[in-house]
Image (spheres, rainbow, N blue to C red):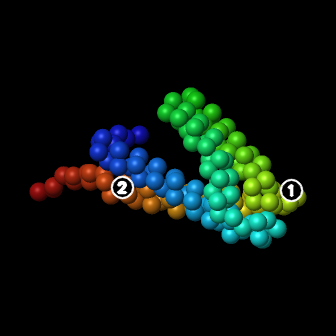
Amino acid sequence: TFRLPLGPALVHAVVSYGLALAMVYVLALIISDLAPTFAGKQDLTQALKVMAYAMTAAWVTGIFSLIPLLGILGLLGALYSLYLLYLGLPVLMKVPPEKALAYTIVVIICGIVISVIIGWASGMMLAGSMPQPVMPQIR
């Protein structure tokens, strides 16, 4: 573990929050664009609703990650978010129930790819704000 100075930690927190909101919007675009593929209705507003609603459980239970022993509750919140996504896609995107599972899996895979990209970008930003170690000079 390492501790960040207050300034870079605040910048990282704000950027991470902004990237999380951007991820919801990008996934809503993907959900809307994929809806006709799964015999659903393409509607960005409904896609944004289902994505924001599904992510709320993961965001709320994310507070448990501050205490390592309660971290499992954050994982349960993330799993519940996936369940909410599965329940919300057929209702809001008008997808037939028999295609809801495949639609949910495709959206989850897209979410994983986007999360990896966002994590990489966030890590690069954090690495750029960290002070570099000073190497001793050998004379």
Residue in the image at 64% along x and 59% along y:
45
Inspect this view and state whether residue 64 appears.
yes
Q: Position of residue 118 (x, y in %)?
A: 50, 59
How far apart marks 1 and 2 lie (CA) works out to 45 Å
Q: Nearer the viewer, residue 107 or 67?
A: 107
Work out whether 59 lies above or below 31: above
Q: Position of residue 37 (x, y in %)?
A: 78, 71
Q: Nearer the viewer, residue 75 or 48?
A: 48
Res 96 → quadrant: bottom right
Q: Which residue is mark 1?
A: 97
User: Residue 41 vs residue 118: left or right?
Assistant: right
Q: Amino acid at mark 1?
A: Pro
Work out whether 118 lies above or below 70: below
Q: Tell me the quadrant of the picture where the N terminus can be found.
A: top left
Q: Which residue is mark 2?
A: 127
Q: Amino acid at mark 2?
A: Ala
Name the residue at the right extreme: 98
User: Residue 77 vs residue 19: left or right?
Assistant: right
Residue in the image at 15% along x and 56% along y:
138
Q: Position of residue 78 (x, y in %)?
A: 65, 43
Q: Nearer the viewer, residue 38 or 4?
A: 38
Tag 1: Cα neighbours inside 10 Å, few (<14), some, or many (≥20)?
some
